[in-house]
């Protein structure tokens, strides 16, 4: 059943939303010779992430549809001055008559606009709104595509699908599902070669920053705690120091990227909010690689590192595999919520005053 956007987007329930938008009639308007439009979308998404109080946590741009996982950050926009609100808005929607390259003229124009408190408040609300973020992402791209095709009409389906993500495991499952869309579709062989996805963006950024070695070390960090020879005691203090070192290294690297950091290091090192505390980018890449191998017979193996990841999430390889196979087994996600426990879903149902809410992924019989 369709749920009104205003009722579904509730920051007291969750700040994370998985949005899916399809090309009209599911036509391959970003494929079959029009793959360059995917780059348009990716560049526009980066520009919006840098100016909206909306963090992009994951994305995949396919031939006929778009996935984007976002987090709404209302606390961020509240700290912006009136001038900053105006500057951010015109970075997204530049006025045609304003000379943006003339800093003196621009500064005077911004100062004048900032005096209109009602308009500034309107823009402040838009810059933290999910609907406006999706509108600002999709509408300019539709105009560019129509201009290229010398035609008029609808490019995207009128309403995008949004799914409220309710817990950590559901958040990671959604990230992996989005990043592995090209692999599941047979477009890419591995996650890191999947063009126009957040996982490739993260790996390419690490490469550009010269941090691939640190990233690989992070992905296999648990091995440092294992004895090198039978009967040898692992050096836990040395491992702990190494753990802090690579977490700081990767944390600084993620801070400099436009995507939302995977690990939330605010309590330990850095100021920018990430997605999950004590869950590194290296662990996420290991989890995504394992998940991609689940769908190839005999290729997936639960290592000690992965067992540690599943223990951290309070789940198991069996439950993880069940959820991801259910996700990839659907041609269209129908539920408006995604949780990994019945208790969490019941909380939402009680909050909405209904008997139950539909989950995007059916829970396992013993889940």
Image (cartoon, helix red, strand yellow):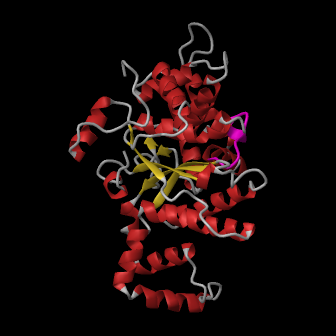
- Pick the front one: 281 or 26: 26
- Residue 80 appearing in the image: no
Query: Residue 261 location, x and y as percent?
Result: 52, 49
Q: Is residue 260 above or below residue 350?
A: below
Residue found at the very far top of the displayed protein? 231
Query: Residue 205 location, x and y as percent?
Result: 67, 50
Left or right: residue 16 compared with residue 21: left
Quadrant of the frame with the N terminus: top left
Residue at 51% x, 74% y is 88
Magenta segment, principal secondary structure?
Answer: loop
Query: Residue 364 location, x and y as percent?
Result: 40, 22
Q: Is residue 101 above or below residue 85?
A: below
- Pick the front one: 96 or 235: 96
Whether 194 is among the magenta residues is yes
Q: Is residue 109 above or below residue 167?
A: below
Residue at 55% x, 30% y is 329
Residue at 25% x, 40% y is 349
Residue found at the very far right of the displayed protein? 33
- Residue 239 appearing in the image: yes
Residue at 56% x, 7% y is 231
Quadrant of the frame with the C terminus: top left
Query: Residue 223 location, x and y as percent?
Result: 59, 23
Count the marks.
0
Magenta highlight range: 188-197
Q: Quadrant of residue 289?
A: top right
């Amino acid at each position: 059943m369709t749920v009104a956007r205003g009722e579904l987007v509730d920051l007291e329930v969750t700040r994370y939303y998985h949005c899916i938008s399809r090309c009209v009639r599911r036509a391959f308007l970003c494929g079959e010779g029009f793959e360059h439009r995917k780059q348009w979308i990716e560049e526009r998404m980066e520009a919006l992430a840098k100016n909206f109080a909306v963090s992009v946590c994951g994305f995949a741009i396919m031939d006929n549809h778009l996935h984007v996982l976002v987090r709404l950050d209302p606390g961020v926009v509240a700290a912006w001055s009136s001038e900053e609100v105006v500057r951010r808005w015109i970075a997204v929607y530049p006025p045609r008559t304003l000379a943006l390259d003339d800093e003196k003229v621009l500064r005077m124009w911004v100062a004048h606009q900032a005096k209109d408190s009602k308009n500034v408040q309107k823009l402040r609300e838009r810059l933290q709104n999910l609907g406006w973020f999706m509108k600002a992402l999709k509408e300019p791209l539709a105009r560019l595509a129509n201009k290229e095709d010398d035609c008029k009409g609808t490019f995207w389906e009128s309403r995008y699908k949004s799914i409220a993500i309710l817990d950590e495991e559901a958040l990671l499952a959604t990230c992996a599902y989005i990043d592995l869309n090209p692999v599941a579709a047979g477009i890419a062989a591995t996650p890191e070669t999947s063009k126009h996805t957040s996982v490739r963006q993260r790996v390419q950024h690490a490469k550009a920053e010269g941090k691939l070695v640190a990233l690989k070390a992070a992905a296999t960090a648990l091995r440092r705690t294992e004895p090198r020879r039978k009967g040898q005691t692992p050096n836990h203090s040395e491992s702990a120091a190494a753990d802090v070192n690579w977490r700081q290294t990767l944390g600084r690297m993620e801070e400099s990227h436009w995507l939302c950091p995977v690990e939330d290091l605010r309590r330990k090192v850095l100021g920018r909010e990430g997605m999950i505390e004590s869950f590194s980018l290296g662990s996420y890449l290991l989890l995504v690689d394992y998940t991609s191998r689940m769908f190839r017979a005999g290729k997936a193996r639960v290592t000690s590192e992965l067992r540690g990841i599943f223990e951290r999430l309070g789940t198991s390889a069996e439950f993880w595999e069940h959820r991801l196979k259910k996700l990839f087994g659907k041609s269209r996600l129908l539920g408006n919520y995604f949780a990994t426990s019945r208790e969490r879903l019941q909380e939402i149902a009680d909050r909405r005053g209904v008997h139950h809410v539909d989950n995007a992924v059916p829970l396992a019989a013993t889940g």
